[in-house]
Amino acid sequence: MIAVMKQENKRIHPHKFTLWIALASIIMMFTGLTSAYIIKRNLANWITFELPQIFWYSTAVIIISSITIIISRNYFRQRQMKQYRLWLAITLVLGIAFVLMQYIGFTQLWHSGITLTKNVSFSFLYILVGLHALHVIGGVVALGIVLVKAYSPRVKTYNIVPVDLINTYWHFVDLLWIYLLIFLSMIR
Amino acid sequence: MNNDEVIHETPLVVHDLGHEAHTHHHKETFITKYVFSQDHKMISKQFLITGIIWAVIGGLFSVIFRLQLGYPDQTFPFLEDILGHWGKGGKIDPEFYYALVTMHGTILVFFVLTAGLSGTFSNFLIPLQAGARDMASPFLNMLSYWFFFLSSVIMFSSLFVQTGPASGGWTIYPPLSALGEASDGAKMGMDLWLASIAMFIISVLLGGLNYISTILNMRTKGMSMTRMPLTIWAFFFTAVLGVLSFPVLLSAVVLLLFDRHLGTSFYLSDIVINGKILPNQGGSPILFQHLFWFLGHPEVYIIALPAMGITSEVISVNSRKPIFGYMAMVGSFFAIASLSFMVWAHHMFVTGMNPFLGSFFVLLTLLIAVPSAIKVFNWLTTLWKGNIRFTPAMLFAIGFVSLFISGGLTGIWLGNSSLDIHLHDTYFVIAHFHLVMGVASMFGMFAGIYHWYPKMYGRYMNNTLAYIHFWVTIAGAYCIFWPMHYEGLAGMPRRYYDFSNWESFKMFGGLNEFISVVAMIVFSVQLLFIFNFFYSIFKGRKVTTTNPWGANTLEWTTPIRPGHGNWPGEIPEVHRWAYDYGKDGRDFIPQTEPVGADEQRH
C-alpha cells in the first residue's frame, strides 16, 4: 500500500496540472497583446509614455507578497495554522494594496494627460496593466476563499493542494507583472 | 492515477484507507443527474444535444439564404410570417441576408463543430478510453458546459434584438464591426456576439484544461501514451490548440470592445462615415486580422482533428484491421497541430502583405499537405483488403475521407498566394472549406454519434434511416459544393445578395437554383437523423452485449449503461495497444487482455 501511495504521489495532482495549462493559456493572451503592441509601435503615430513612480512601489509590494505567501505555505506544512493564517492574511492585504496602487497609478497617468483614447500607445498601456490587475483581483478572491476556509471552525483540512494552487497562481501573477513592467519600460 | 478523490472531493487520506470499496453511491437528484451534472457522460450528452439544436438553427439559416440565392426574383410570403420585418413582402431584407450568413458561420464553426463535436466526444471518450473514472476536475467540466450554455443563450437572444444579430461576416472584421454607425448588425447584435464569444472562449478553455490534464495524468495502469487510441491523441492535440489559440481571440475581442465603447483606436484610423470624420487615429484593421486568424487557423484544426480521430478509430474497428501506421498518424497529428500556428497569414494574402513574407506562408501552408496526405493514405491502406462492415458509422467515416480528399486538394490551390489573388473571396473558397472542414467534420461527428450511440444511450439507432441519411447527405454535399468550384473560378464573389445584375454571372442562375434545391433536400434529411436520434433514445433496439462492435478499446469493458465512475470495480489494466484486430487468427483482442507467451510481437 505504501509503495502504491508513493507511486501515486510522484505524479502531479491533476488540479495542479490543470492550473499550469491555464497559466499557459493566460500567457498566450498576453503574448497576443504584447506582440500586437510591438507591431503597432513600429507604425506611425506612436507616442511614448513614462510609467508613474507608484508602479515601482507596487512591484515591491507584489514581490513581498510572493515571499509572504511562501512563508504561509511553510507554516502550513509545519501544521502551524495560526501562523499560516496570519501570513495568508498579510498576503491578502498586500494583494489588495497592489490593486489599489495600480489604480492610483492609473489616476496619476490620467491626470498627467495620458488618457485611454489619446493615443494607441496609451490604450495599450491601460489594457495590459488593467488585464493584469484583473488577474490579480481573481487571485485576491481566491486568497480570500482560502483564508475564509482557514478560519472556518467547521472544516479542519490539512490538504495542501489548494494552498499549492494559490501559491503557484500568485507567483505567476507576480512574474507576469515583472515581465509587463520590464516590457513597458524597455519598449515604449 | 485513481481519481475517486476528485469525484468525491474528499481528502486523499480517506480514499487511501478504503481502497477496495469502489461502489459509487452518492445521492443523485434530478438536478444533479441531468442538469448540473458532473458526470462526463452526461455533460457530453448536454454538449451534443445543445449542438444539435444549434445545428438545426444554423442549417435552417443556410436554407433561408439559399432561397434568396436560388430564386432572386421570387417572393416567399411565408418568410414574412416567420421573419417579420426582415422578410417584408416575402423577400429577405439585404441587411438580414448578411446577418444570416454571419450567424450561419458563427453557429456552425463555434457552436456546432467546436462545442458540439469536440465538447461531446472529448468529454465522452477521454475518461472512457483512457481509463479514468471522470475528468481531472468534474466541477470545471460542468462549468465548461454552463459557460457554453450561457454563451448560447446570449447568441440566441441576439437573434431577437430590434437591429438584428451581428452581420459583418463570421470573421467580424473591423472597421465594420467596430462602428455601430456602420450597419444595423454592428449595433446591439455585435455586442451580444462579442459577449457570447467571450463566454464561449472561457468554456473552451475550461474544457481544454480538463482534457489535457486528464489525458496526461489520469490514464489507467498500463495505458502508455503510445497505447492510446487515436481518438484520444486527436482530442489531446485539439485541446492544446484550443488552449493556446483561443486566448488570442479573447485579446482581439477585448480590444474590439474597447474600440466600440471606450473610444480607443486599436483597429481604427482615418475613417469617414456618413460624411462625418471620426477622430480615431493610428489604428490598423489588419492588426485585428492577424489576431483573429492566429486563432482562426488553428480553429480549423480544432474542428477537423476530432473528426480525424473518430474516423481513424471507426475505420479500424469496422475494417477489422489494425490502423495502418499508428506512429505516423500520431506524428502527423503533431505536425498538423504545430504547423497550424504558422500559417494564419494565408487568409490575408490580399491585405497588401509583403509578397516576400507571403511566400513563407505559402511554403508552410503547402507543408500541411504532407501530414494530411499521410493520414489519408493511412486510412485508405487501413481499408485496403479489410473485412469491411458497412455500418452507418463506417459509411460516414469513409465519407469523411472522401470529402477530406476532395476539399483538401483545392486547399493546395488556395495556399498559393498567386492563385489566391484570383480565387480569394469567391465561391471557390466556400466550396473548399465547406468540403474539407465543414461537411467533412460533420461526417466525422455523424460517424461518432452512430458508433458510440450504443454506449451513450444503451440503444441502437435505426439503420434504415441511417443509410438514407448517409446516401442523401453525401450525394447532396457533392451536388451543393462541387458546382461552387466552377462559380468561384468564374469569379463569382461570396457574400453577395443578388448576382442577377451581372451579365457574367447570369449563366449561373440555373446552377444556383439547383444548389438551393439540393440544400433543402439535404437539410430535410438531417431532420430525419434528428428524429432517429431522439426516437432511438426511448424506443431504439436495446443493446444486449457490452461490446457490440467487437472493439478493443476500454469503453466497451464498462457495463452497458455505466454509472458515474464508469467501472463498477477496479479500473481495468491495459496490456496492449488498441488495434489488435485480426491478429494470430483472432478477430480482435481487447486492450485488457495480457500479452500471451506465444503471441506475435505487437
Image (cartoon, rainbow, N blue to C red):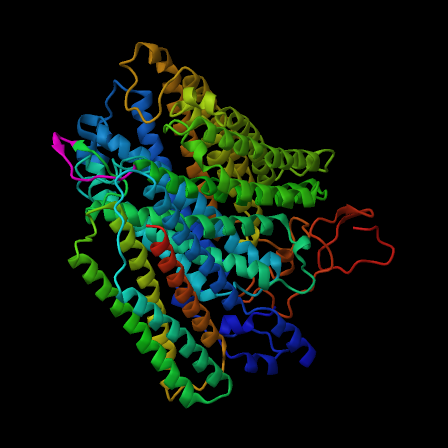
In this rendered view, identify the residue nearer to me: B222 or B457. B222
Magenta residues?
B273-284
Q: Residue at x 34, y 68 (%)?
A: A59
Quadrant position of the N terminus of chain B in the picture: bottom right
Q: Residue at x 38, y 26 (%)?
A: B350
Residue B18 appearing in the image: no
Q: Is residue B315 left or right of residue B28?
A: right
Q: Position of residue A63 (x, y in %)?
A: 39, 71
Q: Position of residue B21 (x, y in %)?
A: 61, 78
Which image quadrant is residue B310 in? top right
Residue B294 appearing in the image: yes
Q: Position of residue B397 (x, y in %)?
A: 58, 38
Q: Is residue B47 magenta?
A: no
Q: Is residue B479 left or right of residue B371?
A: left
In this rendered view, identify the residue nearer to me: B528 or B378. B378
Q: Is residue A111 left or right of residue B102?
A: left
Q: Residue at x 32, y 50 (%)?
A: A188
